[in-house]
C-alpha cells in the first residue's frame, strides 16, 4: 500500500515526539516535513539528522515547498491562536488538518469515542491531553447511566508543560469542559489542570468524577475497565490507578451543581495514570504522549481510508 505523506507544523516537544512516533509506528503514514520557526530548535536538527524534510520558515516554508502538493495530512502542534491562521492558509489546498491545539475550529475527536463520526472532516481537533485521558471514562459511565455532572482534574509534571501548554491554559479548561459535554455526554462539565512542580517529575494523573441520578456500580465499573483497555491499545501507559470508587448521594444531602441545582444519585470516581512511551519525551510526559498517540491513531485511520478510496 502506498504511503500517505504527512507534515507537522511545530518543531517543539509535541511535534518532535509525533515525528518519531510516525517514523516508528505510523504506517501507512510517511513523514514528509517538519515545520518550525526556530532554526536552532532541537526538533528541526533531529529532522535534518534523520533525513526528513524540514523548514524554519513556518507555514510559508511549507506552502512554498516543492513537496507540499504531495502532502495529504498536516498536523498542527503549535498554539490555538496560530492554528486559526494555519487553517485559513491551508484550507484552499484540500489538506486534512489534525489540530493538537485547543483551537477547536473543527469537531472534537477522541479515537475510542467518536472517530467514525468525523472520518470525512478536513479539520479535526484532538481536544486536550486531559480530554483524551478523561472523556473516554465519562462516555463509558454515560453509556450506563446519563451523567448529570462530570468534573476532571488533570495533574501533569511542570517540566512537561512547555510554552505552548502554558500559553493555552485558559483554552485548555474551556475546550476540555465543552468536550466533556459534547463527547462524554455530560449535562455539565468542568475541567481543572494542575502543573505539579515535584522533583523528580511525576507521571500524569487524572481524576474523573461523574454524578448520575442512578446506575449499577458493577456495570459502570466493568464499562470503565473495558474503556481503559481500549485506550491502552494505542496509549500503552494508560491505566487505572486503583479500583473504580462509588458513593451514594442521598436526597437528604444532595450535591449542588451550578446551573442544574441539587442532585442526588451515584457518584463515580476514577483515578487514572498515564505514563509516556519515552519515544522522544521522558516517561513522565504522559500528557504529551497521549496527545501524539491519539493524533497518530486518528491520522492512521484516515490514511487507510484515503488509500482504500483511491485503490
Image: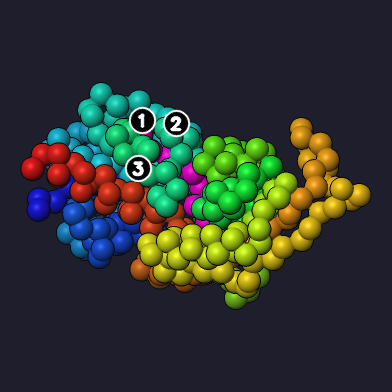
Q: CA separation, marks 3 and 2?
A: 18 Å
Tell me where residue 25 appears, x and y as whole percent: 26, 63
| Residue pictured at 54% horizontal, 37% vertical | 182
| Dot placed on the residue nearer the N-terminal end, 1 or 3 | 1
Nearer mark to the viewer, of 2 and 1: 2
Q: Is residue 222 magenta?
A: no
Screen quadrant of the C terminus: top left
| Dot placed on the residue nearer the N-terminal end, 2 or 1 | 1
**SS at badge 3:** helix
| Residue pictured at 65% horizontal, 38% vertical | 187
| Residue pictured at 66% horizontal, 58% vertical | 216
The residue range painted magenta reads 123-133
Q: Which residue, given by chain and number where applicable, does mark 3 sit on?
A: 116
Tell me if residue 164 comes above or below residue 88 in the rendering.
below
**SS at badge 1:** helix
Tell me where residue 41 appears, x and y as whole percent: 36, 55
Label 3 Cα crowd, 10 Å radius (few <14 / some 14-19 / many 20+) = few
Tell me if residue 6 comes above or below residue 232 in the rendering.
above
Query: Given contact means CB atoms under 8 Å apart, are the residues at marks 2 and 1 in contact?
Result: yes
Amino acid at each position: 500500500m502506498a504511503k500517505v505523506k504527512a507534515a507537522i507544523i511545530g518543531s517543539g516537544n509535541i511535534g518532535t515526539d509525533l515525528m518519531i512516533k510516525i517514523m516508528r509506528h505510523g504506517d501507512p503514514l510517511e513523514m514528509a516535513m517538519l515545520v518550525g520557526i526556530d532554526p536552532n530548535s532541537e526538533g528541526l536538527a533531529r529532522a535534518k539528522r534523520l533525513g526528513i524534510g524540514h523548514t524554519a520558515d513556518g507555514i510559508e516554508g511549507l506552502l512554498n515547498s516543492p513537496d507540499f502538493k504531495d502532502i495529504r495530512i498536516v498536523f498542527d502542534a503549535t498554539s490555538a491562536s496560530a492554528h486559526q491562521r494555519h487553517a485559513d492558509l491551508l484550507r484552499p489546498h484540500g489538506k486534512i488538518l489534525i489540530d493538537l491545539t485547543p483551537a477547536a475550529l473543527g469537531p472534537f475527536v477522541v479515537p475510542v469515542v467518536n472517530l467514525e463520526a468525523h472520518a470525512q472532516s478536513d479539520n479535526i481537533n484532538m481536544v486536550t491531553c486531559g480530554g483524551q485521558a478523561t472523556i473516554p471514562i465519562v462516555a463509558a459511565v454515560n453509556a450506563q447511566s446519563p451523567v448529570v455532572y462530570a468534573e476532571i482534574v488533570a495533574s501533569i509534571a511542570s517540566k512537561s508543560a512547555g510554552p505552548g501548554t502554558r500559553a493555552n491554559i485558559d483554552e485548555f479548561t474551556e475546550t476540555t469542559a465543552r468536550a466533556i459535554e459534547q463527547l462524554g455526554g455530560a449535562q455539565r462539565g468542568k475541567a481543572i489542570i494542575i502543573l505539579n512542580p515535584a522533583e523528580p517529575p511525576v507521571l500524569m494523573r487524572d481524576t474523573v468524577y461523574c454524578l448520575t441520578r442512578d446506575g449499577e456500580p458493577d456495570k459502570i465499573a466493568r464499562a470503565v475497565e473495558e474503556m481503559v483497555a481500549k485506550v491502552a491499545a494505542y496509549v500503552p501507559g494508560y491505566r487505572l490507578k486503583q479500583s473504580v470508587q462509588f458513593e451514594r448521594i442521598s436526597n437528604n444531602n444532595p450535591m449542588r451543581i451550578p446551573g442544574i441545582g441539587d442532585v442526588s444519585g451515584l457518584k463515580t470516581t476514577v483515578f487514572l495514570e498515564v505514563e509516556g512511551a519515552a519515544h522522544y519525551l521522558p516517561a513522565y510526559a504522559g500528557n504529551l504522549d497521549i496527545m501524539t498517540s491519539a493524533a497518530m491513531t486518528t491520522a492512521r485511520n484516515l490514511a487507510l481510508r484515503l488509500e482504500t478510496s483511491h485503490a
